[in-house]
Image (cartoon, helix red, strand yellow):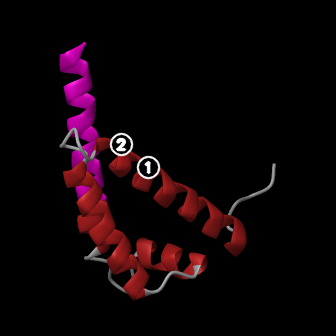
Amino acid sequence: MKIISSILILITAVLSIKHGWDGFHIDANTEQAKMAAELGIGRAVILVMSVVGIAVGIAILFPQTYYIACVINAVTIVLIMALSLKGGTIKQL
């Protein structure tokens, strides 16, 4: 069970760091930049969220900061969902 938990924690950390790193490389013509513009997110906010994503990815690896890193990750996801609702990018069923 510890092996599975370790693998899942490692995958979470790698994905958080990857998504944070990708935020530094958004060009004006990419699909990511168009999505950020639809959500009303500026370049400065993207950079801050990228730094937070990398910090969360690193913090998840340490048992003392695991919980707060997961909470920050969840808040980030809820923030993106709220911005999607505000921007009207979620389709009605």
Q: Quadrant of residue 86?
A: bottom right
Q: Residue 54: image x %, image y %?
A: 24, 62
Q: Which residue is mark 1?
A: 71
In the image, is 75 to the left or to the right of 81? left
| Element assignment for label 2 | helix
Q: Are marks 2 and 1 in contact (CB under 8 Å)?
A: yes
In the image, is 69 to the left or to the right of 87? left
Q: Residue at x 64, y 64 (%)?
A: 82
- Asked whether residue 13 is drawn in magenta, I would say yes
Q: Residue at x 59, y 78 (%)?
A: 38
- Asked whether residue 77 is drawn in magenta, I would say no
Q: Residue at x 44, y 49 (%)?
A: 71
In the image, is 48 to the left or to the right of 84? left
Q: Residue 25: image x %, image y %?
A: 26, 76
In the rendered image, the vertical position of residue 48 relative to residue 81, given as above or below: below
Which label was assigned to residue 67?
2
Q: Residue 31: image x %, image y %?
A: 44, 72
Which amino acid lies under the numbered mark 1 shown in the image of this protein?
Val
| Element assignment for label 1 | helix
**Crowd class of label 1 (few under 14; some 14 to 19; many from 20; radius 10 Å):** few
**Residue 23 in view of the camera:** yes
Which span of residues is magenta-colored? 1-19
**Residue 88 in view of the camera:** no
Marks counted in the figure total: 2
**Crowd class of label 2 (few under 14; some 14 to 19; many from 20; radius 10 Å):** few
Which label was assigned to residue 80?
none
Q: Residue 30: image x %, image y %?
A: 39, 77
In the image, is 39 to the left or to the right of 92? left
Which amino acid lies under the numbered mark 2 shown in the image of this protein?
Tyr
Q: Quadrant of residue 28?
A: bottom left
